[in-house]
Amino acid sequence: MNLPWPANPLLYEINARVWLRELAGGGAPLRLDRIPEDAILRLKEEGWNALWLMGVWAASPAGVRIARDHPGLREEYLRALPGLREEDVIGSPYAVGAYRAAPDLGGDEALLRLRERLAVHGLRLVLDFVPNHLARDHPWAAERPEVFVQGTEEDLARAPSDFFRGPEGRVLAHGRDPNFPGWSDTVQINYASPAARERMRGELVRIASLCDGVRCDMAMLLLPDVIERTWGGRLGPGPVQESFWPEAIAAVRALHPGFLFIAEAYWGREAELQEQGFDYTYDKWLYDRLRAGDPAAVRAHLGASVGYQRRCARFIENHDEERAARAFGGGRWLPAAAAAFGAPGLKLFHEGQLEGRKVRLPVQLARRPPEPPDPEIGEGYRRLVAFLREPLLRAGDFSLPEVRPAGPGGVSSGQVIALLWGPPAGSTLRQRALIAANLGGSPACARIPLSSALGAAAWVLEDRWDGSRYEREGGEMASPGLFVALKPHQIHLFEMRPAG
């Protein structure tokens, strides 16, 4: 039975391979069902609604070997982890050897026991589904080679980075993104094959019996036109006519109503995947605009329809991106986090983000270097997450107020982003929540006109960021607007309520 999902959930990504080894004190990882109770309680107390455990599936022996021998990857490992040992390299979790929890983690039985323990504390479990490919030594490569994209000897000679010789001398294709060479530890599934679709649908249904949601890796690679662009002419039965996702998502939800689907998605295909059944799609557009430090582009992006916004997965860090403390250095992480997580949608945080870690660990590694926690960053996230858990930000109505210059010639207002949450339609609540963030590196002043529905009476604005308290007239906040003066990269987290 799946725990129901709240609106605008807080999801916490943890690298299971690293976490379980650190919990064990180094060496062999803990089994999933032996995670200490205090570690689970800590996740609950931090305020998360769900845990995304990245890297629980059985590893591929070939994937481990390739990860250890790949010269380019080795350079990346050494940059992240000086003193690298061979046993630190355990292969990519995205070259799945089997959709079974790894034996050294206790297998599926231990995974189910962990899920039960998480549920007791109101925590849901999210796992990965990698639909585009499997590990190159997956049993199907020998048993059912017809479910993979086939190549020829000419293909192998012409593009050895995209093809390999599989069992019984067959030439098979590596999984790939059409813009890059193949992933050498994988084999590409052929979605023009009815047998392949049936088998992958079966794998997804089985995964859904183990967790409360899936994060679908590179979900847009399964859209028919993308498959045709990548593999056209090599699909055997002919071009893919229908997307895999609507039928697969329907099959899962027939057995597990309320099961959650998150799409890692790029290239402007997010709305299309939402229409095909995904609850949330990655919002890389917002990430890129925040990282570029472009407040106007951020504001324009957040002005899209609220229906679309509610189904975006917001982040300023994950295992694929630079650590936020480095990517948004000089204090930029704070307004970026306030803008991203203050918007509607799923809020994705990454383990280590709250401590200010700066080293992005390659996913093939099971150990990471020690880094001292940054107490200022830690306290900042603690306050922000506490604010995000307020009822208005979970179930209220979102709007994007206009931001105006505070006076003639005032240009610094262009650095300010404002996000407003009010009571849902039909509610008798009068409270509001307002986030104001200065995305710029210089002081900024602005006016933020709020609704005339505030009335003329006085309102109390309590800043949950620094504890300051203000009283303002509703009429003034409606026109000319609430005045804010922000230092570089400063934010306000206003809880608004009628005075008296």
Image (cartoon, rainbow, N blue to C red):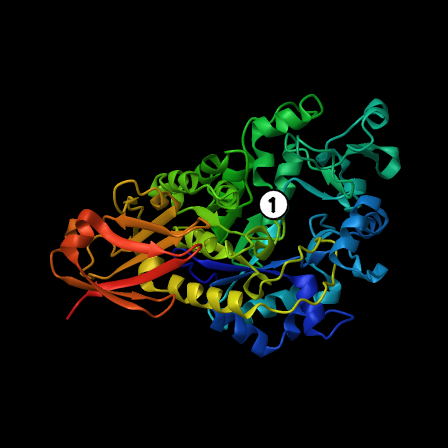
Identify which residue, 460 or 219, lies in the foreground: 460
Q: On screen, 28 above or below 265?
A: below
Three-letter amino acid code at disc 1? Asp
**Position above or below: 68 against 149:** below
Relative image position of residue 76 (x, y in whole percent): 76, 50
Question: In the visual, does 407 lie left or right of 46?
Answer: left
**In which quadrant of the rendered image does the C terminus lie?**
bottom left
Q: Position of residue 206 (x, y in %)?
A: 60, 53
Question: Residue 243 appears in which quarter of the rendering?
Answer: top right
Residue 59 visible in this rendered orientation of the protein? no
Q: Residue furthest front?
A: 409
Which of the 4 quarters of the picture holds residue 220?
top right
Residue 247 position within the rendered picture, expressed as x and y whole percent measured from the top left: 51, 39
Residue that numbered label 1 is attached to: 217
> Residue placed at 80% from the left, 49% from the top?
75
Going by the image, does 421 lie left or right of 373? Answer: left
| Residue 415 position in % (x across, y down) | 39, 46
Q: Nearer the viewer, residue 17 or 192?
A: 17
Residue positioned 40% across, 39% down in the render: 296
In depth, the one of 476 and 140 nearer the eye is: 476
